[in-house]
Amino acid sequence: MKVYADLHIHSKYSGGSSEKMNIPTLVSYALIKGLKILGTGDCLNPRWLRELKDDLIHVGGGFYAYRLNPEVLFVVECEVGTVFEFNGKSRRVHHVILMPSLEVAEQLSDVLSRYGDVESNGRPVFNMHPSELVDLVLGVEQSCFIFPAHIWTPWWSLFGSFSGVDRIEDCYGDMVDKIYAIETGLSSDPEMNWRVSQLHRFSILSFSDSHSPYPFRLGREACLFNLDRMEYLELIDAIKSRDAKRFLMTIEVDPAYGKYHWSGHRNCNVGPLSPEEARKLNYICPVCGRKLTKGVEDRVEELADRPRGFKPENAIPFIKVLPLQTIIAFSMGISEDDISKLNSGKVWSLYANLVSKFGSEFNVLLDASIDDIAKASNPVIASYIKSLRYGKYSINPGFDGVYGKINMFGVSMDLRDFINR
């Protein structure tokens, strides 16, 4: 069965998360998006764990479903942080943990509560070396699956310019052979990661890290699987083995749209700066003299040992997209800076009509006929989706926590085709 999965999200108990991050709302929006499998998010938090036990039922094979609507499956999941010292400097890295049951989550929460506070936030932080975290997690249950989250984000990531390391072994030490995958994050894509040869042995995953249930956040990055059996172990094996018959592709937001793709300093309105411009400034803000937030593209360039365009053998394919609501809003002159307008009646009406017509947002973005999209919305939106599919658009890159801005879409529909319809 072909299924879209978003296995890294949060609950309402994580800092900065929407109060609407609850199971019923997540199920509703996952169906609209086209997602079949979701992570639960924050499963170590006792309050969220109680809600998960109340709302979910085990449907077999390590998957769960909402009691009142079993169409969306859930995998037990959380994100945690570790703080450790390496080469005399404090390092901070986020990790995603998948597990086969809520019972395992309860056991792991109890074990990790001895190393940090699992109750105050959905995403707890532990003062320990990541190798110790891996050892503890697998000591509770061998079938748990752990991987570094959004590995290039400047803060709290494996290769982060402010808090990361230069080699994955420097993070996971003698437990690195228990790591089978990495997560791209919004500001990078597989093509960028392919340039770093030390990553070629790992599966490349893409998930949303969503703190909001709305479809312009949930599932904005996802993976497409074709599973023989709808079971947790089958899903994990497909990832570990990089079996192209079961792990079909990743869905990526264009990295330029991500909040840290290029360098800059938003407090001083400096940016986005290309890698060349940032290097000329020695990564120092010309206004205040403080360090610029180094962009992901710059950081990839520092560690890259393969040329642009390099592709490893047996690489899993990927597709770059933008959220449908964002595309519709752009067609109306609305910026994503105003989130309330992204969910406005005008945008939502067009969005809902397209999803109703074609079944899901993924179907609209990836599969539906451009002519049919034009009939269900208008020629402008159809031409933008056509541009998206052909990569004929441009984005002013994001920097220092600011999302990128769409400049234009470049493939026009022939409006004469619609005059007499």
Image (cartoon, grey):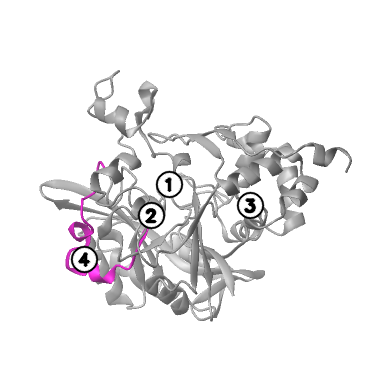
Alpha carbon separation for disc pair 4 and 3: 42 Å
Alpha carbon separation for disc pair 1 and 4: 25 Å
Alpha carbon separation for disc pair 3 and 1: 31 Å
Alpha carbon separation for disc pair 3 and 2: 32 Å
Tag 1: amino acid: Gly
Q: Which residue is mark 4?
A: 132
Q: Which residue is mark 3?
A: 365
Alpha carbon separation for disc pair 2 and 4: 18 Å
**Of the residues tagged 3 and 2, which is closer to the observer?**
3
N-terminal of the pair, mark 3 or mark 2, is: 2
**Of the residues tagged 1 and 4, which is closer to the observer?**
4
* Residue depicted at 21% across the width and 65% down the height: 132
* Residue depicted at 55% across the width and 53% down the height: 218
In the rendered image, residue 219, in percent from the top left (x then y), is placed at 54, 55
N-terminal of the pair, mark 1 or mark 4, is: 1
Q: Is residue 391 left or right of residue 355?
A: left
Q: Which residue is mark 1?
A: 15
Dividing the picture into quadrants, the one containing residue 116 is bottom left
* Residue depicted at 34% across the width and 47% down the height: 308
